[in-house]
Amino acid sequence: MGNATNLITEHQLIFLITLGALLFTIAIATLTIYILWRKRETERKRFMRRAWRARFMTGVTGLEEDGHEEIVW
């Protein structure tokens, strides 16, 4: 691209391609982190639901009368 009449120089083109690649990489990394975070939160919520269901099914609610032992997890 040695022609002086070009609206964009070779250096500007290289810069724009590099900038685009950098922004694309950042977007992919952000999306990956978001997906992994949602997966982790979903698993945590599922575990909490399961744990609460197990506690109530076994009658362990933390509100037992005196004389009743609470199951230690």
Image (tube, rainbow, N blue to C red):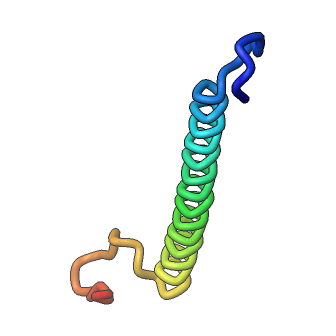
Q: Nearer the viewer, residue 2 or 31?
A: 2
- Vertically, is 9 above or below 42? above
Is residue 29 found left or right of 68 in the rendered image? right
Q: Quadrant of the C terminus?
A: bottom left
- Vertically, is 63 above or below 34? below
Image coordinates for residue 31, horizontal then vertical, percent: 62, 51
Image coordinates for residue 2, horizontal then vertical, percent: 70, 26
- Vertically, is 64 above or below 3? below
Q: Nearer the viewer, residue 49 or 17?
A: 17
Instruction: Write down the quadrant of residue 11 in the picture.
Output: top right
Instruction: Write down the quadrant of residue 65 in the picture.
Output: bottom left
Q: Nearer the viewer, residue 56 or 12?
A: 12
Is residue 6 found left or right of 35 in the rendered image? right
Instruction: Write down the quadrant of residue 64 in the picture.
Output: bottom left
Image coordinates for residue 30, horizontal then vertical, percent: 56, 48
Question: At 34% across and 69% down in the image, what residue appears?
Answer: 63
Question: At 55% across and 83% down in the image, what residue appears?
Answer: 57
